[in-house]
């Protein structure tokens, strides 16, 4: 079924929709329900109009999470913090192409510090803006909502980016995973089959975790 490097699809629940007073409980529950990664949304109130969590929280999550941490940085000048986020335990660290003057240097720095390097783009940013960085990426994230908040509607006009990334990977021999983030649910996952990893916040946390995760993986 999977066209990419994974044998089965992965699901990465976004803790933005978890109970922040009970993160350990919720993380252990989604891990037991079959999740593959834990998606952690870091927002700085500048790059996006919302503030969430920072390095000390990631460090604490790392101590209790049975799942690798998939950290999505929605912050200006991420180069200031990549070392701290990797020391805190980020396994995948994803930056926005619009957030830094030197995306290639930041991706190389992430890899040199031992983490997997991810690149992403806002819905209105064209795919050509990240093409030069694809050889440096272990993960490419396609945003299907405007970054900043959970619970928004899926933007179907972004699906073409997943298709194009899948074609480029095949044709050029790239090795990145394709991840999709925003409004992913039972209703929209069918349009995302060029992605390898499904991020889902509200859909997982507002439903029975096991059923939701199995549905996204096409196992239900
Ligand atoms: C939005 C975040 C998402 C968010 C997804 O800026 O990047 O990870 O948590 O939430 P849902 O799945 O509810 O759209
Ligand atoms: Zn995210």
Image: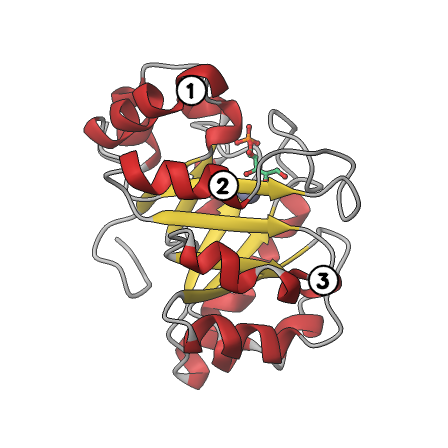
Q: Which of 1 and 33 is in front in this view?
A: 33
Tag 2: Cα neighbours inside 10 Å, few (<14), some, or many (≥20)? few
Q: Which element is circle 1 on?
A: helix
Instruction: Name the residue rendered at 64%, 72% in the picture.
Output: 130
Q: Do residues under tags 1 and 2 come within 8 Å of each other at their CB atoms?
A: no
**Mark sitting on residue 191:** none
Between marks 1 and 3, how big is the CA–CA gap?
Answer: 31 Å
> Which percent across, then down, holds residue 18?
46, 22
Q: Which element is circle 2 on?
A: helix
Horizontally, residue 97 falls left or right of residue 95, namely right
The disc, 1 or 3, on the residue closer to the chain's N-terminal end is 3
Q: How is the image coloured?
A: secondary structure
> Which percent across, then down, holds residue 115?
39, 66
Q: Which of 161 and 198 is in front in this view?
A: 198
**Quarter of the image with the C terminus in it:** top left
Instruction: Name the residue rendered at 62%, 82% in the picture.
Output: 132
Tell me the residue that label 2 is attached to: 56
**Mark sitting on residue 205:** 1
The disc, 1 or 2, on the residue closer to the chain's N-terminal end is 2
Between marks 3 and 2, how big is the CA–CA gap?
Answer: 19 Å
> Which percent across, then down, holds residue 61?
38, 37
Q: Which of 140 and 42 is in front in this view?
A: 42
- Camera-nearest label, 1 or 3: 3
Indicate if the residue with disc 1 has its beta carbon within 8 Å of ligand 1. Answer: no
**Mark sitting on residue 77:** 3
On the rendering, which quadrant does ligand 1 occupy? Answer: top right
Q: In which quarter of the image is residue 65?
A: top left
Instruction: Name the residue rendered at 66%, 31% in the picture.
Output: 149
């Amino acid at each position: 079924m999977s066209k990419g490097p994974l044998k089965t699809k992965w699901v990465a629940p976004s803790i933005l929709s978890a109970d922040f007073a009970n993160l350990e409980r919720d993380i252990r529950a989604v891990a037991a329900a079959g999740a593959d990664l834990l998606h952690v949304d870091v927002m700085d109130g500048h790059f996006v109009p919302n503030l969430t969590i920072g390095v000390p929280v990631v460090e604490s999550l790392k101590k209790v999470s049975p799942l690798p941490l998939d950290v999505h940085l929605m912050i200006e000048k991420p180069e200031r913090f990549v070392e701290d986020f990797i020391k805190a335990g980020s396994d995948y660290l994803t930056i926005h192409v619009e957030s830094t003057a030197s995306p290639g240097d930041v991706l190389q720095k992430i890899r040199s510090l031992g983490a997997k390097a991810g690149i992403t783009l806002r819905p209105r940013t064209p795919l050509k803006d990240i093409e030069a960085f694809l050889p440096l990426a272990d993960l490419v994230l396609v945003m299907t909502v405007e970054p900043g908040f959970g619970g928004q509607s899926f933007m179907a006009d972004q699906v073409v980016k997943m298709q194009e990334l899948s074609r480029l990977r095949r044709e050029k021999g790239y090795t990145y995973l394709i991840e999709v983030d925003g409004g992913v649910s039972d209703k929209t996952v069918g349009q995302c089959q060029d992605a390898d990893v499904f991020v889902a916040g509200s859909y997982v946390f507002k439903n029975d975790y096991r059923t939701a995760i199995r549905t996204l993986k096409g196992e239900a």
